[in-house]
Every structure is written in structure tokens, then in C-alpha cells.
Amino acid sequence: MSVAADDAAAETYYQAHMADASVDAIAWIGPIQSCLLLIVGVLVDPLYDAGYFRSLTLTGTALATGIATTGSSFGGVIYPLVVQSLLPRRSSRTPGKRRRRVMMDLAAYRNASFVILSAAMFFNVFSYTPPIYYLQQYSLAHGLASRGSSGPAYYLVAILNAGSILGRVFPAWLAGRYGPINVLLGVCISVATVTMCWLAVRTGAGSVAFALAYGFTSGGLISLPPTVVSIPVPHLNLHETWLGMLSTTNAFGSLAGPPIAGVLLEKTGSYLGVQLLSGLGMTAMAMLVLLLRMTGMEKGRTWIM
């Protein structure tokens, strides 16, 4: 998700230097990049299942996954600052390669738990990225920070990602004790609440507080799903295939959220639609994870009750 942070910095640059392009047209740039990044999971993960990549299995897998995902948070702190500094002085570059195997296990779509999880993760990525893309612009539009390229608004995405570092590790640690689905449900409720609080942000201090809170509460949305998807998988050798299929669902969510937010902003001239889109999407995700919790997806000590 450090790529999304990079896009957020670039988005402000595009709007300043592509005055003839509409907001919703610009809003497609980052999501297409994120979609292409996620959708290749359906190609790569079966290769993992087939043994083409070596894996390291650790006890406390949820915590190990959580620590691993902090890498993109560190990247999310660094990238926006680097991009903000380099974009006025540098330009762009080009693409890469591929290979094949069984890409999908259609039996997964007959598993109610996997279908519910897929729907929840669609709303996860659909709702997760608009605040990252638009918080910086929201702050500038409301005069919450100076417009100079070194103004406080330009550090908000870096602050958000700094909050996400602990937000990825702490829920992963809790997941080892209380079960990944229980913890994911708590994370979803927390991030939905924080996202709706964005409606009340009116000051620079409020923007910083929201960025930190959103980064912390949303961190678990990155680190927990790979652990949760292992619960309904019938055989461990299918784990990466199912994870790749889940990643493909995420790709469509990333492709839909920011452009719809861009259209709402373009049509209404207000960030209210963007805020509600993200907040209500997070609420829908929380309700789906609650439903998932109630379906009885059991394995080991996943459940408290």
C-alpha cells in the first residue's frame, strides 16, 4: 500500500499540472496501477503452491505476517516525501514479463466463508484508498495547511503510513491470541468509526490526528487477511491459490473506489461524498466480517466463544 501513498502524492501533482483533465479522469491513474499490482496475485500465487518459491514457516504466523507488512508502511512514509521532492525535477519510465499454471480453484466459490471474505475484502480496498488519495487535497482545499510544496499537508500521507506500522503489527500479535477473525472484526469496526470521523475534521491538528488514527486502525486490514484466508482453505497447498483469487477481488475494489470518489468530488464540488463513500464502505465491510464470524469458520482456537 506504499504504492497508494505514492499515488496520493502524485495525485496532487497531476491536478496542479494537468489543469485540462477532470478530477475523475485523474482519479483513474492510481487505481489502475494498484489494480494491476493486485490482479497478478492470481498468476503468481499458484506458482507458490506448485513449489516454485521457497517459504519460511514460523510459529505465530499472524505476527510474522504483520511484521512483514510493515515494510510497505515504511515505504509509505518515504515514497510520498521522495515523490514530492523529485516530481518537479524528474520524469517517468516503462514495463515487464510472465508464465502460467492452474490459476483458480473454482471450488472456493462454493465455500460460503470464502465468498463472504471476498466481498468483505472488496469493500476493504474499495474504501481504504480514497482517504489516502484525498486527505492531502482535502486539507489544502480547506486551508488546513500551507500550499507550499513543503507545507504540513504534504506530510499527511507519510504520517498516516507511520501510524500504519504499529497498526499492522499489533493486530497480528493479538490474532495469535484471540483468533484472526475476531481481531479483524475489531479492526473493521474501529476503522469504520475513524473513517466516519473524517466528516468532523476542520483543523490542521485534526487532519494530523485523523491521519494517525486512520493509519493505525487500518493497518490490520493489510496484515490480517492473508492469515484469515487460511482458515476456510481445505488443503494448505491451495492457500496461495485462494489468496491470489482474493487478491484479484481486491484489484477490482482498488479500481472502483478512487474513480467513484473522483466522480463524486467532480459532480458535487464537495468532499462529503468521498468521506461517506469510504465510511459507508468500511461499515459494509465490518458487517460482512461480522457475518463471517457468525458462519462458524473454525480451526483451532480461532473463536473466543
Image (cartoon, helix red, strand yellow):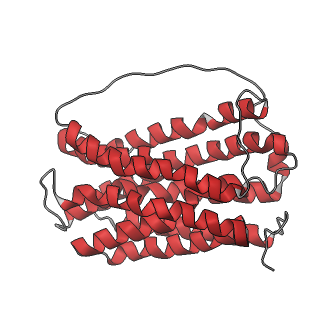
Q: Residue at x 68, y 66 (%)?
A: 175
Percent position (x, y) of residue 32? 46, 38
Quick one: 268 or 30, which is closer to the camera? 30
Q: Position of residue 146 (x, y in %)?
A: 13, 61
Compared with 304, 30 (above or below) is above
Residue at 45% across, 37% down:
33
Name the residue located 87 percent from the left edge and 49 percent from the top edge: 234
Of residues 243 and 82, which is closer to you in this image? 82
Which image quadrant: the C terminus?
Answer: bottom right
Left or right: 303 in relation to 191: right
Up/down of 76 relative to 94, above or below: below
Side (left or right) of 118 relative to 108: left
| Left or right placement of residue 10 versus residue 255 in this view | left
Which residue is located at x 42 percent, y 43 percent?
A: 3
Residue 152 in percent (x, y) is at 20, 61
In this rendering, does residue 289 appear at all? yes
Can you see residue 118? no
Occupied quadrant, residue 16: top left
Say how many tags the image has: 0
Q: Please, is residue 272 above or below residue 154 in the view?
A: below
Residue situated furthest right in the rendering: 234
Q: Nearer the viewer, residue 266 or 202?
A: 202
Would you identify the image quadrant in which residue 183 lies? bottom right
Residue 93 x, y percent position in the rendering: 34, 23
